[in-house]
Image (spheres, rainbow, N blue to C red):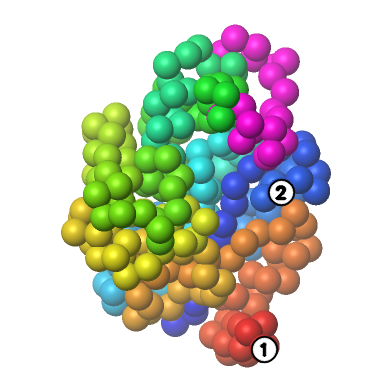
Amino acid sequence: MRPVPVLMYHHVNRHKDDMVTITPEVFEGQMEYLYRAGYKTLKIAELISYINGGMTLTQKAVVVTFDDGWLDNYMYAFSTLKKYNINATVFLITNRVENASLQNSELQTLNSKLTIPTHEESKLLIGRGESHKVVLNWKLIKEMSNSGMIEFYSHTKSHAECNSLPEKELMEELKESRGIIEKKLDSPCPYFCWPYGKYNGLALTAAKEVGYKAIFTTNHGVVEAGSDPFAINRIIVKDSVAWLKKRMVIYTSKTLSSLYLKIKKK
């Protein structure tokens, strides 16, 4: 069977060449390509079923993921995902969402006049307690979830580096984030993504104890039937439609992806 690339996004906004950012025009071009080229965009449960041998893929498939839960995901990505019928998953940092939800959303108060800051400016705003200017709140998350296309799972409570936390703090990060997502969205939260891709044996054991059934990493690679569901590889997406087209041809071919990934490791 064909491998499945799991695409990793963060921001979608107009700050071209900013950190972890794709411009809206490029994002639309990438999603249009996936749609027109006939890719099946899997939900996470489908990906896990494929990994475990419960699902056979008869067409090219891909998974679209977003880390952190930035407000620009709603502003610039959501409409495009709906336009091209693309399923996607957002991994939430729940403390930020909670803080954003305590104040009126900038999106509601400023509407079309809202200016999305750069990645570094966004982090500074979060540090000043102004998450609502850059992070999704529960109202917007519920709207996206109710579309039936966007899923939300855990990215910890505070975006902590899970490879350096004492066990008690680690369990809090993993358990509390899962619990509030389940409470707010009234649906299970069995999937998780490591902040910064950092974890160790203790963190992995703790995540399993909390009840996560699959975990996403920042490790570069594709997913195949029989892959480890607790160490799911992803592909960091670049701000280029041409780049995505070329990589999708490679990453959905068992032979090409194997050769290419071996070369990249050298």
Which amino acid type is marked by label 2? Met
Among all residues in the image, which is located at the extreme top? Answer: 109
Element class at badge 1: loop
Percent position (x, y) of residue 218?
A: 52, 64
Q: Which of 246 and 58 is in front in this view?
A: 246
Q: Is residue 214 visible?
A: no
Q: Quadrant of the N terminus?
A: bottom left
**Label 1 belongs to which residue?**
266
Question: Which residue corresponds to mark 2?
Answer: 19
Depth check: 171 or 264 in front?
171
Q: How crowded is mark 2: few (under 14 residues within 10 Å), some or many (20 or more)?
A: few
Position of residue 4 relative to residue 113, above or below, is below
Q: Residue at x 29, y 29 (%)?
A: 184
Out of 65 and 42, give the one closest to the viewer.
65
The residue at the point 27 percent across, 40 percent down is: 176
Q: Is residue 16 visible?
A: yes
Q: In x, y percent, where is residue 146?
A: 38, 32
Residue 249 picture quarter: bottom right
* C-alpha distance separating marks 1 and 2: 25 Å
Q: Where is residue 34 in the image (x, y as percent from the top left)?
A: 62, 58
Report the residue at 72% width, 36% height from top: 118
**160 lies above or below 100:** below
Image position of 186 (left or right of 125): left
- Identify which amino acid the numbered label 1 is placed on: Lys
Count residues near mark 1 (Cα–Cα under 10 Å), then give few for <14, some for 14-19, many for 20+: few
Circle 2 sits in a helix, a strand or a loop, which is it?
loop
Give the percent coordinates (x, y) of residue 61: 50, 66
120 within the magenta span: yes
Read off the magenta span: 108-126
Among the 4 quarters of the image, the one containing residue 14: top right
